[in-house]
Image (cartoon, rainbow, N blue to C red):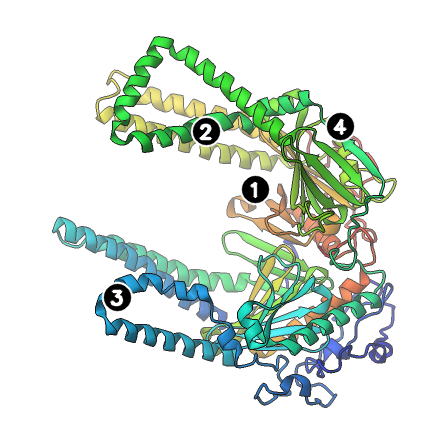
Amino acid sequence: MFDDIPARTLHPNMRWVWVARGLFITVIVTAVPLAVATIIAAATETAVLWWPAVLIGTIALAWSIAWAFLAWPRWRWDVTEIALTLHRGVLTHHVTGLPFFRIQHIDVQQGPLDRALGMSQLRVHTASISAQLPGIDADEAVSLRTDLLDRAARAAAEVTDGSVDAV
Amino acid sequence: MDPSMPSDQGEHESATPPPAPDLTRPATEASRTGQPRPSGPGHPEAPADGPPPPSPTPGSAAAPPAPDTTLAAGDGFTLDPSDTAPHRLPLRSLIGGISPRALWGLFPAFFVLRDTGLGFVAILAAFFVVAQVARFIVWTRFRWGFDGQVVRISSGILWQRDRAVDVERIQQVEVQRPLLHQVMGTAVVTVETASEGGESEIRLDGLDNDTATDLQAAILTARRRERAAAPGAPSPDPTMAEPSTPDTDAPTNSILKPPVADLVRSALTGSSLLVVPLSIAALGEFAFDVFGNDIDEVATEAARAGARVGYLTIALLVLIVGAIGAVVTTLLRDWDIELVRRGDDLRLTRGLLTRQATTIPLHRLQVVQYRQNWLRRAMGAGTLVVHSAGGGTPASPNEGGGAKMSIPWVTTADLPGVLAAALDRSLQTHEDLPGTPRLHPPAARRRLVWRWARALATLVGLLVVAVVVLDVNGVVGVDGPGWTGVLLAALVFVSGGAWLFSGMQYRRLGHASTPRVVLVTGGVLGATSDWMPLGRLQGVEGTATVFQRRLDLASVHLAPAGKGNAPVVITDVAMATADDLGDHFTLVAAGRPATVGLGHGPGPTMPSSPPRPPEHRPDPEHHVDP
């Protein structure tokens, strides 16, 4: 499970989506302490204590950019013989095996940034866990879903063991 | 997989005509109809050694698209042949969709803005117009479609979402007509699958009546054909295709009927003991509400009275009252509790004043948990909780198809019988439950030592901080043991505690499996055991944190079906074991438990269990006996 790394990577542009998300998070985590500092400064009539906010913001920025470039090579996926396999995670490694037989339905999602960069996101739902597969080429996403749904239908027909229920 | 089997897609192509012609348009994602469904057991699979036949990309469909007259009529839109979800909702669905609750949202705005007079009306009108324009734009993007195989919706302006649900997975199709919809001549169609979310997977609000009923009929027909095409295949939907018969004639076997004495025991050893103290606490809050600021005086008065009676007596009294309260609440809830098997259902009835019955169809059973706290473990008993995927068919109108049932007192002697009954449908005949769990590698203990050390150090740290704060305030005398003494004591406490608790927890850490059921054990002072029928396994996740990887460890999460059913986690096995377990369980989740042994060679894989494996089978590489 951990040892066989799937072959396919995400769309290279995914890094820029993550960087953009990192920038957004940076703005939030900087703005909140800055606002708090301003309020305190106003209440105590002292100068605004700005450096904690800047420090937090710098760390957040550095980490989110570093994370985007560390996470991309770690994100691997593939459609194996029986399952959709996802490998991901920088600090904690996650490996997910989602057998076609268990797939309930699949969403293809596209945010504005995804659309600008020519990507889509697949969300595969089972009766218990749902897996997200971001950064799929927009042209490929629909055919990938078709392929997965097709495999799901075939797998369901193949399983004849009475003790196995899809739910 | 058998790579030698030929592919006979062509044969089936003609055998699977689209079922509902009026609702069916040629699927342009051609594989849905171009690669027809296999028609039963033994259907060839994709070759094992290569990628499966490539799915045609959208737009490559050979069949010329036929105009979809039924649904296009009156909708006022042009049909795009490359669009797989071609239909809009009728324009009047915009009116039908106005929610009265949304109008209530304006209520607070009224109070804020009422002084502005006519301005208020203007603001309200502007608000309404903007909201309706937004709704209209959303409406223009919303499309749905059904090609005889897949129901699709596509929606969203900035964040676009496109959902596809295969008929084979559909559990329920409902057509509802709320009041406003009746006036408009529209209906709400909801399509549900067994997916993890609570809400309907597809909701078409404002479809006109005829289309709604046609769609419902078409989906049901398609699904029936699907099920009929694969008779050997399990029905993923027991509520419709394979109803658990509420047959009162079915043989009823009593499995367990704990006597009153056992119920009392369970009351006195479990969390019900807290019922009375918690009620007193709640009463205290109530007293605070009643007496308000006089509470101090009342409390002082009470303390004085307490001092007269003696605090020991009061403590004893609370204990006795607490015990009585626990017994009474338990008996009220669990009086005459009985677990029976009726047909293929497990049924639990209990209660003194109101009889409660919970039924779980055995094929919906997901996880069986046996929980022992240290007291119950010492007494050789525990609580058994049976989790299902929910949504079972009620046997009678008064009887809920429960999501879980809990039996408060099951002795270790009774446990095998109850387990055998609960897991009966998951086991094959002549097959036993998983045997004695295998232990995890010593590195798991090292991780536990660190975790306990961290937890205890945090505790000590908080205590020290508290003492220091009190000391600053002059509450604690200065002539304490001094910092060296405190540090030394903390060190001894943390390391000793970590060593002791990690040892206890490590000895309980284990897992075992047959091809059909997996068992995972855990606990520190108490003991927990989770049995999970592998036929319900939905997916497998492996995780390895930084710390786990440094110790060459990983965890394997086995996800059962059903909302709120937490995964069964095999924690801290060797990385190599996790690799094999993960691969094995993924195969199992793919529906191949019987055919796939644990053919990953000898070694650290799960025992492809002979019935009753010997006690503690130590594995030279990854498992050791203590």
- Image spot of residue A8 (x, y percent): 61, 68
Q: The N terminus of chain B appears in which quarter of the rendering? A: bottom right
Crowd rating for badge 2 (residues with CA inside 10 Å; few <14, some 14–19, many 20+):
few
- Mark 2 secondary-structure assignment: helix
- C-alpha span from label 3 to label 4: 68 Å
The chain carrying label 4 is B
Amino acid on which the number 1 mark rests in the picture: Leu
Mark earlier in primary sequence (3, 4): 3
Crowd rating for badge 3 (residues with CA inside 10 Å; few <14, some 14–19, many 20+):
some
Name the residue carrying label 2: B279
- C-alpha span from label 3 to label 2: 44 Å
Amino acid on which the number 2 mark rests in the picture: Ser
Describe residue A108's horizontal placement relative to residue A65 as left or right.
right
Amino acid on which the number 4 mark rests in the picture: Asp
Among the 4 quarters of the image, the one containing residue B110: bottom left
Name the residue carrying label 3: B113
The chain carrying label 3 is B
